[in-house]
Image: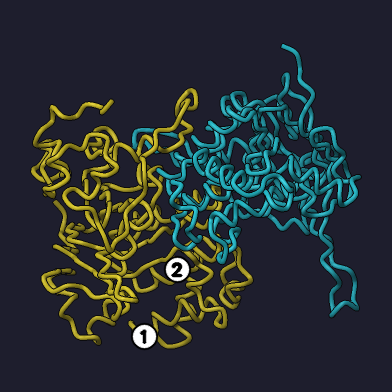
């Protein structure tokens, strides 16, 4: 096994909602490891807590209303990010751990040139001179495949297309050579041909630079093609985690199973006559259901699921804990029959 | 099989948006944005035509021009026997009962100050379709039909989830009993499990009410799920139009091939040779010469002719049209 970079244990990020409607338990006990050079995919639908997880890793959660609960643990190469002083934390953010966001237009500053925005991190973190930082910005634009980088470096975000802006965002994130890159839905706002370009670029850069990537997406197709290991999130928790080929060959959590069956596909000889759909919707984070949080939508649920919350159980294939599932079906597999 | 007369017929439709003049209106006129250029197709009653393309290809403008929400520059549209662009306002209003639209963003297209009941009652009032208890009964029937709990009738849009709002949007469109629905990215903003629910609902409604759909989307996998025929647009023009099975089995235009190849497949073992197109979609105000796709085209036989001569949309196989000089030798 390669070197362990990031260790997250029992991460809980809660938000106090306005008008005293209670506490939104957006992330509620998430644990995972990230090794050097690895790509980890976090998948789930809106409201499952994947974005809050990624923002928590960089401690970008606005406090208040949000707070990371005591007992949570985020460790980057032996340093606990949750107890780090602000100054030490700033030295990590954008330097050792960087992030790219979904909306390149809203995450870029419209009044600065893209060159200035890329150079900023190099000046702040690595003490480069303005001239050296500009040269580095041009080099980064070349790296991310922006045509004509010497001219583009002086352009403003509005002069670029969506795909180019996302390349600039990637250049910004990579300028300090981070060990961990967090990409939150990096291609969701892009057209499918541009999405293919950006995914290919991320793959190539990871090979060249050897960084670890956390890819957050709702698209199971993207996960299948790019990541080594998948975490499936539902209602603030990890409900299944497995190496990518194993997860797609043997999805064990009913939510994972349902998600895979809901995707319209191009790789079948005929379209499905009818898509499988998961009834109902993701519940509100202020009122997760008791017992297993998926039970109101689960086709297999029985009385135990309504009262007793399942822990992550080992699916017992491959290395210990390589495929874990938060479902009582692992303890009582005979119940995996479709309800009438 | 008897060919049915089409319910919707679009003939040589053109919509250009003037871009004004340079220098605060004093200079030379800027080139117009050719959003829709000479587009023609038919949709048979009870069928779904999928319309796909990337942002800026003109698919939304096309949908809105067909409904005459935007005035066209040229061409003709016949919906259910009526010449849409020749109608006078009162006749157009009557026709609007027969053609409706569902938009992508259900939050932006519902009035935040109107409850679900008021939203669904409005078209019934405007078209004088039902009053009093009958109106209430129709609202409940609509909610049942789109799978919404009757108790939600008093809710406001902000209290509903994305999927529920989209169901309200569909119920509102159905309230006037249309024959033709334009679904403009109607499931694109939804999560995959909810998207599946809404796609299934649309299929059920089509069967039950014999609806005709123009299904506009950028996701080819979603379109495959619902469309009988598919048309692919690039820079305001149709580049391919074919029965869905044919188009997905053997695309004739290299742009269609590239689009299909770019869709991520949820199978880690799928060893596909991904065809990654270089560059961005050019601006529709400055489309490239010849075949507008030629600067990005990956076809190995691409040559000088593609740069100079615009390929006509022509029939390659029965019912399958493509606008490519090499449509007889499609890419694999």
Asked if residue A101 is positioned above or below residue B175 in the image, the reply reads: below
- Which quadrant holds the C terminus of chain B? top right
- Disc 1: which residue: A124
- Disc 2: which residue: A171
Q: Choose between A271 and A195: the one closer to the eye.
A: A271
Q: Choose between A230 and B161: the one closer to the eye.
A: B161
Q: Position of residue A148 (x, y in %)?
A: 60, 66
For image coordinates 27% across by 48% down, the residue present is A230
Chain A colour in the picture: yellow
Name the secondary structure under disc 2: helix
Coloured how?
A: by chain
Viewer can see residue A323: no
Q: Position of residue A181 (x, y in %)?
A: 33, 64
Q: Which mark is residue A139?
A: none
Circle 2: is it few (<14), some (14-19), or many (20+) Cα within 10 Å?
many
Q: Choose between A55 and A340: the one closer to the eye.
A: A340
Q: Position of residue B21 (x, y in %)?
A: 86, 72
Q: Position of residue A235 (x, y in %)?
A: 27, 55
Which chain did the renderer colour cyan? B
């Amino acid at each position: 096994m390669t070197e362990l970079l990031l260790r997250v244990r029992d991460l809980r990020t809660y938000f106090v909602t306005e008008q005293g409607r209670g506490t939104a338990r957006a992330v509620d006990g998430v644990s995972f490891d990230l090794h050097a050079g690895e790509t980890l995919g976090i998948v789930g639908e809106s409201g499952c807590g994947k974005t809050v997880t990624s923002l928590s890793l960089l401690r970008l959660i606005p406090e208040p209303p949000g707070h990371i609960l005591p007992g949570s643990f985020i460790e980057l190469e032996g340093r606990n990010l949750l107890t780090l002083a602000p100054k030490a934390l700033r030295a990590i953010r954008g330097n050792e751990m960087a992030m790219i966001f979904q909306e390149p237009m809203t995450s870029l500053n419209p009044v600065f040139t893209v060159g200035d925005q890329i150079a900023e991190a190099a000046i702040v973190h690595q003490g480069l001179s303005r001239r050296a930082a500009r040269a580095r910005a041009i080099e980064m634009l070349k790296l991310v495949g922006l045509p004509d980088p010497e001219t583009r470096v002086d352009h403003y975000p509005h002069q670029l297309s969506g795909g180019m802006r996302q390349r600039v965002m990637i250049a910004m994130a990579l300028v300090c050579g981070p060990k961990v890159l967090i990409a939150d839905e990096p291609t969701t706002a892009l057209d499918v041909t541009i999405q293919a370009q950006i995914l290919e670029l991320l793959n190539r850069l990871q090979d060249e630079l050897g960084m670890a990537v956390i890819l957050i997406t709702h698209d199971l197709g993207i996960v299948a093609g790019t990541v080594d290991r998948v975490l499936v999130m539902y209602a603030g928790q990890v409900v299944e985690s497995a190496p990518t080929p194993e997860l797609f060959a043997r999805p064990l959590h009913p939510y994972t199973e349902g998600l895979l069956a809901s995707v319209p596909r191009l790789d079948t000889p005929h379209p499905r006559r009818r898509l499988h759909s998961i009834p109902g919707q993701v519940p509100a984070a202020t009122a997760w259901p008791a017992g297993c949080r998926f039970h109101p939508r689960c086709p297999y649920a029985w009385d135990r699921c309504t009262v007793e919350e399942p822990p992550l159980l080992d699916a017992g294939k491959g290395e210990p804990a390589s495929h874990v599932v938060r479902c009582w079906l692992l303890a009582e597999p005979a119940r995996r029959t479709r309800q009438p | 099989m008897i060919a049915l007369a089409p319910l919707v017929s679009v003939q040589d439709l053109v919509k250009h948006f003037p871009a004004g003049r340079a220098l605060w209106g004093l200079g030379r006129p800027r080139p117009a944005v050719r959003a829709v250029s000479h587009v023609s197709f038919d949709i048979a009653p009870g069928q779904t035509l999928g319309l796909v393309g990337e942002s800026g290809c003109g698919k939304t403008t096309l949908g809105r021009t067909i409904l005459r929400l935007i005035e066209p520059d040229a061409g003709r549209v016949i919906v259910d026997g009526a010449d849409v662009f020749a109608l006078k306002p009162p006749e157009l209003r009557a026709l609007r009962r027969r053609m409706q639209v569902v938009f992508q963003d259900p939050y932006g297209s519902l009035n935040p100050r109107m409850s679900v009941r008021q939203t669904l009652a409005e078209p019934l009032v405007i078209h004088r379709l039902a009053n009093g208890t009958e109106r209430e009964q129709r609202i409940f029937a609509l909610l049942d039909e789109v799978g919404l709990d009757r108790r939600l009738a008093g809710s406001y849009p902000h209290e509903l989830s994305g999927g529920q709002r989209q169901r309200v949007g569909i119920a509102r469109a159905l309230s006037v009993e249309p024959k033709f629905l334009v679904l403009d990215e109607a499931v694109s903003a939804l999560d995959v499990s909810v998207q599946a629910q809404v796609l299934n609902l649309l299929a059920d409604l089509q069967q039950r009410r014999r609806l005709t759909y123009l299904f506009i989307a950028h996701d080819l996998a979603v379109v495959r799920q619902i469309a009988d025929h598919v048309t692919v647009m690039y820079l305001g023009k149709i580049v391919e139009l074919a029965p869905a099975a044919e188009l997905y089995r053997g695309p004739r235009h290299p742009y269609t091939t590239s689009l299909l190849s770019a869709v991520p497949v949820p199978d880690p073992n799928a060893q596909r040779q991904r065809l990654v197109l270089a560059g961005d979609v050019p601006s529709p105000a400055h489309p490239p010469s010849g075949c507008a796709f030629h600067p990005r085209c990956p076809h190995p036989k691409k040559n000088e002719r593609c740069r100079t001569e615009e390929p006509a949309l022509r029939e390659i196989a029965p019912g399958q049209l493509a606008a490519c000089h090499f449509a007889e030798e499609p890419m694999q």
